Image (tube, rainbow, N blue to C red):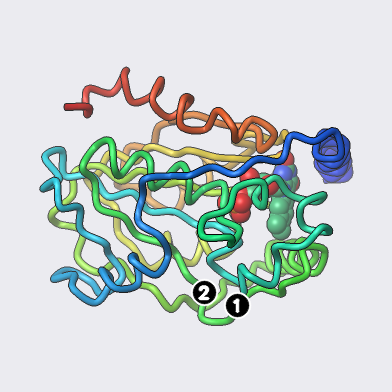
Amino acid sequence: MKKKVLAFACAMMVTASLTACGINEVVNGTAPSSSQRQGELANSPVSPSVVHNPQGNPHKILVAYFTYPENTDAKAIHSDKYDVMSSASLKTRDGVAIGNNTVIADYIANQTGGDLFSILTEKPYPTSYDETVDQGKEEIQNQELPALKSHVGDLSGYDTIILVYPNWWSTLPAPVQSFLKETDMSGKQVYAIVTSGGSGFSDTIQTIQQAEPGASVHEGFALHHNDMANAEGAAQKWLERTGWLP
Ligand SMILES: Cc1cc2nc3c(=O)[nH]c(=O)nc-3n(C[C@H](O)[C@H](O)[C@H](O)COP(=O)(O)O)c2cc1C
């Protein structure tokens, strides 16, 4: 564990120095904004938390994702401190920080026609990045599974689940574990996509497979959070190998 923590700390230092060198940028995505998303949530026939794609979802794909900024007050975390500590804040939409995993999940849903689901905790995480890092560690160490306020409901309309998440303390964030515990993915193809400060997938593929023994779990791709400027390019490259593009 000590080694993993050290690797993470080093990755954070690299992020801090690169950010200080001026790699901050604004990404203008075509995906729905958070407020549009909230509006669409209310219209979903399957679950009020699933955003249905108007393209009709030809490949029966659900893109489920977890991201820190959607689980705190994103306006409050868009600070210099957060800029330095996480590349998540390197991207903004309507002046508000958006998560690394939101960028990837939105892009994949838009390109494939897949539906979109954001894993949201009942209790928001602190707006302090440092406190969130500590809380994320405690949850994992104590095997706490935070209660969720978004629920995916019936998965029978989907063949493929694309799970997009950050690496937290060299494993799956506890809220993603909560999501897996309440969701039966038996018979589905599950593709994992991770962003991190250098830890990559760590043990997450095995953790997902253990939580979903009836599913076939595959590595999608891993992206370093310093490479978020190329997130859509990386997603596109992966998608071109899947056969899901029109
Ligand atoms: C609680 C917490 C723990 C983290 N632990 C790790 C880690 O162990 N290894 C790592 O490489 N990055 C770690 N990170 C960095 C995130 O994985 C990375 O910044 C990710 O891209 C954030 O995605 P998001 O903006 O969608 O939340 C951690 C971040 C947080 C908030």
> Residue 87's quadrant in the figure?
top right
Q: Identify residue for label 1.
A: 124
- Relative to 167, 214 lies left or right: left
Quick check: can you spot residue 227? Answer: yes
Q: Identify residue for label 2.
A: 121
Locate residue 181, reporting x and y percent. Answer: 43, 64
- Relative to 64, 70 lies left or right: right
Q: Tell me the element at label 2.
A: loop
At x 20% / y 52%, what residue is drawn? 53
At x 29% / y 73%, what residue is drawn? 39
- Relative to 114, 236 lies left or right: right
Task: Tell me the kind of residue under disc 1.
Answer: Pro
Mark 2 CB within 8 Å of ligand 1: no
Location of the C terminus (image quadrant): top left
Quick one: label 2, few (<14), some, or many (20+) residues within 10 Å? many
Location of the N terminus (image quadrant): top right
Q: Tell me the element at label 1.
A: loop
At x 41% / y 46%, what residue is drawn? 105
